[in-house]
Image: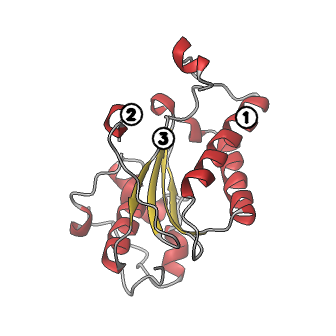
Amino acid sequence: MVGAFHAPFGENDMADYRRWYIPGGTYFFTLVTYQRRPLFQDPAARKVLGDLMRQQAERTPFQNVAIVLLWDHLHCLWTLPPGDNDYSGRWKEIKSTFTRDWLRGGGENLPVSHAKAARGRRGVWQPRFHEHTIRDDEDLENHADYLHFNPVKHGYVKQPWDWQWSSFRRFVKMGQYSRDWGAQGEPSNIRGIECE
């Protein structure tokens, strides 16, 4: 990757996790479908999610710096406006509205325990999400590389260019990557990043 960006776990592992809320910050997120169901193989699910994310960005602005959507999870990098740190509210709205619209449109959810159902949970998303607060340009670049290499890591494609549900091609057009970036294997700067 060339140039710099100009942008300022399992369920049980989350019990003691504390989020950082930095107004105007940049964040890396991972969201996972319930029981890793390959929900986003369905074009209708991809469309519903994409529409909702664009609508949310219009209602409560954020810059979607980079994104990759895989069959059972997604990663993205967001920058929030100055003075704003409410990424949790945005994700809560996206996840709950997706669940509602998906089920109303005939989509299925997986069964959940009686206790989870009593708390209003549905078998569409894993509860919560993973968040990492980006510290500097190098950290941002490393997480963007991780995100864009993810389809290769999971064996979906041989190189990031071949995965269409990602911002990789936009980054190539901006000159951030060459078209064949990642075709030679995992970049060394993403080793050790674990976000799933």
Mark 2 against mark 1, which lies toward the viewer?
Answer: 2
Sequence order check: which comes first, mark 2 or mark 3? 2
Q: Indicate which disc residue 100 carries.
A: 1
Q: How many marks?
A: 3
Residue 137 position within the rendered picture, expressed as x and y whole percent measured from the top left: 36, 79
Can the viewer see residue 157? no
Amino acid type, callout 2 = Glu
Residue designated by label 2: 11
Rounded to the nearest whole Å, what is the CA distance between mark 1 and mark 3? 17 Å
Amino acid type, callout 1 = Arg
Which SS class for mark 2? helix
Q: Are marks 2 and 3 in contact (CB under 8 Å)?
A: yes
Seen in the picture, residue 94 relative to 80 is either above or below; the reply is above
Mark 1 against mark 3, which lies toward the viewer?
Answer: 3
Residue designated by label 3: 128
Rounded to the nearest whole Å, what is the CA distance between mark 2 and mark 1? 22 Å
* Chosen colour scheme: secondary structure
Task: Describe residue 102's horizontal placement relative to residue 80 as left or right.
Answer: right
Rounded to the nearest whole Å, what is the CA distance between mark 2 and mark 3? 8 Å
Residue 109 position within the rendered picture, expressed as x and y whole percent measured from the top left: 62, 25
Amino acid type, callout 3 = Arg
